[in-house]
Amino acid sequence: MAIESSVANLDFAELKRDRQFHPSPTCWEDEVLYFLMLDRFSDGRERGFIGNDGAVSDSGTTPIFADADRGNAFTTPQDETGWREAGNGYCGGTLKGLESKIGYLKRLGVTALWVSPVLRQVAFQETYHGYGIQNFLDVDPHFGTREDLRDMVRVAHDNGIRVVLDIILNHSGNVFSYDPDRHLTRDERGHSFLDPRWDDRPYRVRGFNRASGEATLPFARLPEATGQPNGDAIWPRELQDPGTFTGKGRISNWDFDPEFREGDFFDLKDIHLGGGDLADYQPSPALKTLCECYKFWIAFADLDGFRVDTVKHMDLGAARYLASVMHEFAQSIGKDQFYLIGEITGGRFRAFDTLEVTGLDAALGIDDIPDKLEFLLKGFRNPTDYFSLFRNSLLVHKDSHIWFRDKVVTMIDDHDQVRKGEHKARFCAGDPPATLMLSALALNATTLGIPCVYYGSEQLFDGAGDNDRYLRQCMFGGPFGAFRSRERHFFREDGFVYRELAKVLKLRREHVALRRGRQFLREISGNGVDYGLPRMIGSEIRSVVPWSRLLDTTEILLAVNTDQRDARTASVVIDRDLHAPGSTLACLYSTSPDEVGRTVAVERRPDDARVVRLTVPAAGFVMYA
């Protein structure tokens, strides 16, 4: 299929003709997201995994990982260096590979995919992550074709899984080069160079970059005779106008406004999106062009939502314009709840206010939520630190749980871990018990928000280091496999965490209270007399941590144990009006399988409160109803 060179060539009437588009969910809090980096997920060459049809595939070449394969990439110092360097570039994941693993995700309980950016990247750099776009109307050939994207989405929909695509408006790839005239700087070797860093003044531009990287093209629209888009400059043609870019150089102070809105992300070039106050914001021609491009992808691939990158670095007016255009277009083709999830760094105040004024649907909770969730489970945060995130009505100006129910995407690990600075580490770094990883994922899945699993968590990926690459190891093995391995894949469905998380997510689907109910951290007592919220003693907490989800006349009681060595028992307060003394709660799930089906009796305290006595396995998770 020929790739359009201009948004003027997009035929929306043809894209809509005689098509039934996949409908939106009724409530996005019912969904379970799974975030994957496409280049690191699957190349389609694995052997011995269970396919979409439920049969074991024997046509691939990459065998499944076994414990004996740990460290197989580190046999020599040269091998170790090669493994690490492989993590800096393309490893080989494709859309076809992802399509072949839809069954794996469905059986886990995933109902919506969040896929890293797939659009065409600058040709002369290894921007495997997808954030260096050169053509906003084409798929990068490393990942496949436009048809491959459409086919993958269709297979996902056929299996009850929606697709949310990661998109970028704030910047393009490194599509032009500066001709700097100031800020003389020395590099680590003592060489002098002029550094184009932001100082609120535009820089001269040497020219658009060719596919080979040389800046030898005029910084202007390419001649019409250029014809079919190629790897030169930027596409579609409308974005070749010099006014597309702010041209003020790279950000050095990430907290100074307007620098963080106008500056480049390193060598990714900032796009001028418009100007004016929020109420009368005037979108730039570039923003209008980008919106036409993303409307095209909604219709062409039948997408269900976008994750919008770097919203903090966009004008609020630009985010509002995007939200209005995307929602209206999606509604015109029957997607009434097309979801826009914003990456809004800077804390909950900024996230809440940004959603309120822009019309974006949800914020990505990548600041305080994953920190408090991870270290609560590991015994180094007070439970109230995590649960109070969902009850701060002064912050959200609303009832305790309303905003957080479907306005925040919650997760433990992600591909950046900005919160950890230069000390990146997945939850499983340091080899905690597998039950602890399961308990963390279960806590995330059964508390407020839209839960999201980061790829590899269900396989206990343990990457850690001083660079993002260690959070992005390959599920399919390749040259940069997890556990310091290579050429071994990780699509195992018999592992403890995968198998047990599938059970937890099945229960989440079956019990609406786990998805939409109110949420309360519960008081506990060790002696049956003195009650209080679980809390740290000294510098740690080793305790049962219980919470309830309540909807109408239903209460589901859940608990984790932050003690990794021993089971813990506590009396737990539950709702007085819903439980008569002498009634029972039955165990729906426990990391100790023998407990499932057993009951605990409801007792009356002298003050007429209702309590049950719970035992939670070491590093475990339980669910009662």
Image (spheres, rainbow, N blue to C red):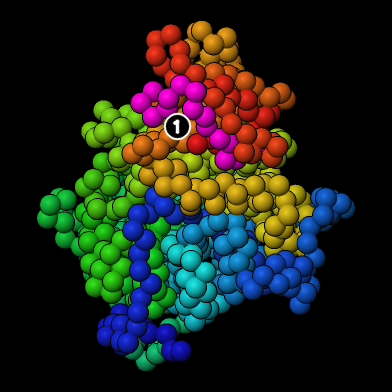
Q: Name the quadrant containing residue 422.
A: top right
* Total number of numbered discs in the rendering: 1
Judge from the rendering whether residue 69 lies leftward or rightward of residue 83; answer left or right. right
Q: Is residue 389 visible?
A: no
Residue 438 forms part of the magenta stretch: no
Q: Is residue 551 visible?
A: yes
Residue 586 forms part of the magenta stretch: yes
Q: Position of residue 338 (x, y in %)?
A: 33, 63
Say which residue label 1 marks. Answer: 548
Judge from the rendering whether residue 49 lies leftward or rightward of residue 244; answer left or right. right
Identified at 41% across, 52% down, the residue is 30
Q: Which residues are magenta?
A: 576-591
Identified at 38% across, 72% down, the residue is 22
Identified at 28% across, 74% down, the residue is 333
Identified at 49% across, 41% down, the residue is 446
- Secondary structure, mark 1, is strand
Question: Most extreme residue toward the left, as rendered?
Answer: 280
Q: Is residue 608 above or below residue 367?
A: above
Q: Position of residue 20 (x, y in %)?
A: 35, 79
Q: Is residue 533 above or below residue 391?
A: above
The front one of 195 and 19 is: 19
Q: Amino acid at mark 1?
A: Ser
Q: Position of residue 415 (x, y in %)?
A: 55, 50
Question: Most extreme residue toward the bottom, as rendered?
Answer: 225
Q: Position of residue 401 (x, y in %)?
A: 33, 36
Q: Is residue 598 above or below residue 140?
A: above
